[in-house]
Image (spheres, grey):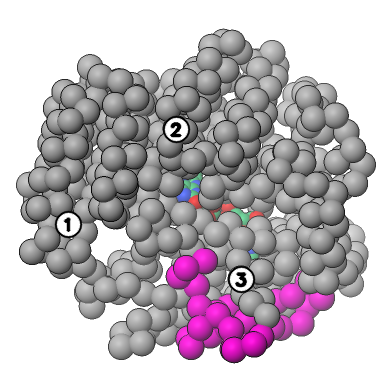
Amino acid sequence: MDRFSSALLERFGAERALVARDQMLAYECDGFTIHKSLPRAVVLPETTDEVQAAVRIALAHEVPFLPRGAGTCLSGGPTPTRPSLVIETARMKRVLEVDERGLWAVVQPGVVNLALTRHVEGRRLNYAPDPSSQTVCTIGGNLAENAGGPHCFKYGMTSDHVLGALVVLPDGELARLGGPAGPRAPHEPDLLGVFTGSEGTFGIATEITVRLSRDTEGLRTLLGAFASMEAACGVVTDIVARGLVPAALEILDAATIRAVEASVYRAGYPQDAAAVLLVELDGVELALDDDAAEVESIFRGHGAISIEQARDPEHRKRLWKGRKGAFGAMGRLRPDLYVLDGVVPRTRLVETLREITAIGRRHRLTLTNVFHAGDGNLHPNIAFDARDHDERARVLAAGHEILALCVAMGGSISGEHGIGSEKIDHFRLMFGEDDLDVMQRVKRAFDPRGLCNPDKVLPSRTACAESSRWPAMVARVLDAEPPAAESGP
Ligand SMILES: Cc1cc2nc3c(=O)[nH]c(=O)nc-3n(C[C@H](O)[C@H](O)[C@H](O)COP(=O)(O)OP(=O)(O)OC[C@H]3O[C@@H](n4cnc5c(N)ncnc54)[C@H](O)[C@@H]3O)c2cc1C
């Protein structure tokens, strides 16, 4: 056994230091299953001291290291690119403090997103950002990805709900960024803002102070079914243009509706619809019926083929079940799923979706769409079989074209899933050499030795200089047959 493994075993014991190759298999990828690579070792710390100890052991042996929450990331963030130490926060799942009057809580990073809301719901509080993976994903992962979710149209992303973090920096030292009073003191740089969304490349958050929200007085949840995607998107544009601010505006296309209705996530969505739009309104009871009536009238103005309004909490749960389970339902179509994430201006949704459909057809792929329409945040889903080398190549080529299209439409290559390893080579679609230079300098300021989650987010200079037809990531995946897996110790 090498010295690095011995040091981990000595500090964490065999139950919490995994060093055997077969123990690594569960960590070979995240939700972006195209990028697979085994870590060198995994540790399961329970405290800030233990995270610090793990980082220091890695530094002493010059081993790259990276944090991992629940591994639901869709861009390869918690998957190593070199034989690395994975520091998994699953055992750091305690809610440390709740201040009901101050409306904040301090949590360990492994607390599951929905578990936090469950923890405070008896006090009529909730944690607003609600990724569709909320039953599994962790607050640490949310902070690192600046996660969004259906209700972020009204309430904002994770960055709007994080007040502070205790961070083990890449050199093993501790830093406290922000706190209950807010993300920064007056006149100080907003380091918490810089850390939020840094995808595990600037250190490991071991305690996170989050903002809690009061439950609103009432809710109205409506589902409109439409004969065309144009009509559903037109409703979204009109709702926003009229000044209504729903909590959520979510669209599912016909193929997604069919997959959902054939699955355990069946929600009773009309199967003859080309698209369904889920609208949730929240606020004071007095105003909600008028707002719901206005939404219904906009639905009708765009020729809705059916309109349904939740009568009670159970009915609401059913309407949401299909949306929240949509990605899972895709498992019925093919064994693998590539979930893309791009943003376009809301007013360009229709033309972008038309182009995306054409890209899917051109590459002979099963492509469906379910998305946060209010934010213009698209999630084209490509169902495929990764064992089919040719199909895998077409999936990646289509993905690249879709992201380039989003940028061409005036949007961006990520709304909420981050860059990770998936989009590292797409960065150049949006940023120039000068931008990269600044970002690389910030990375070096946090991580001068370059050992904290290396080869993520920022492309290297040589990768930048490569042609943009086949980004290096795509080329690497295509070269690897069968899918690459780095060997353990
Ligand atoms: C079915 C499904 C639906 C999804 N829906 C949404 C959605 O609606 N909105 C959305 O935004 N995302 C969504 N996602 C993506 C994913 O759930 C989010 O990115 C989530 O924030 C990842 O959390 P995690 O705990 O799984 O983190 P991981 O996947 O384990 O890690 C994600 C990144 O965070 C870093 N990290 C983890 N813990 C820490 C820490 N303590 N300190 C510093 N860095 C850390 C890792 O290194 C990695 O780079 C979805 C994913 C799935 C599979």
Residue 432 placement, left or right of 147: right
139 to the left or right of 313: right
Mark 1 vs mark 2: which is more N-terminal?
1
Q: How far apart are marks 1 and 2 (CA)?
A: 27 Å
* Residue pointed to by mark 1: 219
Dividing the image into 4 quarters, which one contains the N terminus?
A: bottom right
Label 3 element class: helix
Q: Is residue 233 left or right of residue 417?
A: left
| Circles 3, 2 touching at the beta carbon (< 8 Å) | no
Report the magenta residues as a range.
Answer: 159-188
Quick check: 135 left or right of 278?
Answer: right
For badge 3, the amino acid type reads Gly
Q: Nearer the viewer, residue 448 or 302?
A: 302
Across and down, in percent, residue 113 comes to 42, 62
Numbered tag placed on residue 406 in the rendering: none
Tell me residue 30's x, y (percent): 60, 45
Q: Are marks 3 and 1 in contact (CB under 8 Å)?
A: no
Q: Mark 3 points at which residue?
A: 193
Q: Which amino acid does the dot numbered 2 rest on? A: Leu
Q: In the displayed structure, would residue 395 be above or below residue 21?
A: above
Query: Separation of disc 3 and disc 2 at Cα?
Result: 29 Å
Q: Is residue 388 positioned above or below 473 on the image? A: above
Among the two numbered marks 3 and 1 on one chain, the one whose residue lies closer to the N terminus: 3
**Outermost residue, front side:** 242
The answer, for residue 37, to whether it is visible in the render is no
**Residue position marked by numbered label 2 in the rendering:** 349
- Please tell me which residue lies in front, 170 or 488: 170
Q: Residue at x 45, y 70 (%)?
A: 161
Q: Which amino acid does label 1 sit on?
A: Leu
Q: Would you call the spot at circle 3 few (<14 residues within 10 Å), some (14-19), or many (20 or more)?
A: some
**Residue 2 in sight from this viewpoint:** yes
Mark 3–mark 1 distance (CA, rounded to whole Å): 31 Å
